[in-house]
Image: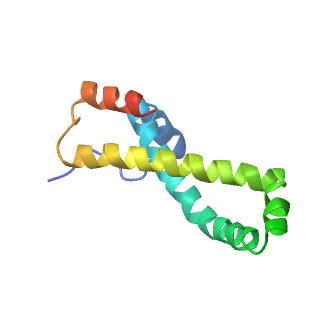
């Protein structure tokens, strides 16, 4: 059986198709996972350096860049966790309709 779906879409067409809030939330969930994957070694290094002594803790967290990275890390964990729970409920068959899916999405955001 021949499918009418295109196999190779140009990026502009993929972006135009994925403009719904549900698609954007799914893409943001993946991006937050990538951010977490990349920031875990950095945050472990920061943790190791900050636990060496009380002076090193003060030195590490006086840096604005470190505070910003910590904020990004916590925000990505929170978003990824909450959206992961939403996806788990969707895998169990809840919120699969468009209206209830959008309601769950906006409540999570």
Residue at (53, 40) in percent of width and height: 12
In the image, is 86 to the left or to the right of 9?
Answer: left
Relative to 50, does residue 79 appear above or below in the rendering?
above
Q: Where residue 44 appears, x then y in whole percent?
A: 64, 70
Q: Where residue 2 appears, x then y in whole percent?
A: 19, 51
Which residue is outermost to the front? 54
Q: Nearer the viewer, residue 65 or 32?
A: 65
Q: How many labels does the image show?
A: 0
Residue at (68, 68) in percent of width and height: 47
Q: Which of 51 and 44 is in front in this view?
A: 51
In the image, is 74 to the left or to the right of 47?
Answer: left
Relative to 76, does residue 45 appear above or below in the rendering?
below
Q: Where residue 15 appears, x then y in whole percent?
A: 50, 38
In the image, is 80 to the left or to the right of 46?
Answer: left
Q: Where residue 52 appears, x then y in whole percent?
A: 76, 75
Relative to 13, does residue 66 appear above or below in the rendering?
below
Q: Nearer the viewer, residue 53 or 106?
A: 53
Please name the colour scheme applied to the rendered image: rainbow
In the image, is 36 to the left or to the right of 92?
Answer: right
Residue at (50, 56) in percent of width and height: 33
Relative to 36, does residue 9 appear above or below in the rendering?
above
Q: Which of 86 and 64 is in front in this view?
A: 64
């Amino acid at each position: 059986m021949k499918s009418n779906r295109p196999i190779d879409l140009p990026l502009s067409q993929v972006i135009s198709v994925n403009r719904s809030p549900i698609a954007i939330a799914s893409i943001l969930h993946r991006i937050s996972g990538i951010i977490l994957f990349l920031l875990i070694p950095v945050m472990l290094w920061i943790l190791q350096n900050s636990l060496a002594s009380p002076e090193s803790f003060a030195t590490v967290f006086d840096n604005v860049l470190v505070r910003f990275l910590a904020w990004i890390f916590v925000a990505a964990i929170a978003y990824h966790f909450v959206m992961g729970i939403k996806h788990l409920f969707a895998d169990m068959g809840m919120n699969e309709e468009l209206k209830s899916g959008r309601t769950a999405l906006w409540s999570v955001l």
